[in-house]
Image (cartoon, rainbow, N blue to C red):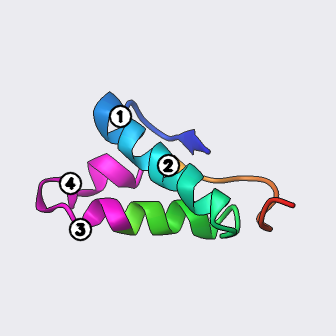
Amino acid sequence: MSSLWKVDDTTTQELMVAFYRNLGAGKGRSEAPRQAQLQLMNDPSKQIPYFWAAFVSSGEWRPLP
């Protein structure tokens, strides 16, 4: 995961916790951040792209072994 712009620390922590939780649940390395972003967007105060759209994944896409 990398960020395309400076992002809010608190929201980033929330997003990354959800991301790693999704990885641990067996989701792929591209599906895990997608699900974390969708979860974050359920919060009305964080629906604007500033909070979740800065993050992109690169590299291996399959679930962790």
Q: CA distance from mark 3 to mark 2?
A: 17 Å
**Does 12 sit above or below residue 65?**
above
Residue mark closest to the camera, 3 vs 2:
3
Amino acid carrying label 2: it is Phe
The residue at which mark 3 appears reads as: 42
Q: Which mark sits nearer the N-terminus, 2 or 4? A: 4
Q: CA distance from mark 2 to mark 4?
A: 14 Å
> Regarding mark 1 in the picture, which secondary structure is present there?
loop
> Regarding mark 3 in the picture, which secondary structure is present there?
loop
Depth check, front residue: 55 or 16: 16
Q: Which mark sits nearer the N-terminus, 1 or 4? A: 1
Residue mark closest to the camera, 3 vs 4:
3
The residue at which mark 4 appears reads as: 46
Q: CA distance from mark 2 to mark 1?
A: 9 Å
Residues at marks 3 and 2 touching, judged by CB atoms closer than 8 Å: no
Residue drawn at (77%, 66%), measured in percent from left and top?
63
Residue mark closest to the camera, 2 vs 4:
4
Q: Which mark is residue 7?
A: 1
Amino acid carrying label 4: it is Lys
Residue mark closest to the camera, 1 vs 4:
4
Q: Which mark sits nearer the N-terminus, 2 or 1? A: 1
Total marks shown come to: 4
Q: Which mark sits nearer the N-terminus, 3 or 2? A: 3
Amino acid carrying label 3: it is Asn
Depth check, front residue: 37 or 3: 37
Q: Which residues are magenta?
A: 39-53
Where is residue 55 shown, x and y percent of the image? 50, 49
Q: CA distance from mark 1 to mark 4?
A: 12 Å
The residue at which mark 2 appears reads as: 55
**Crowd rating for badge 1 (residues with CA inside 10 Å; few <14, some 14–19, many 20+):** some
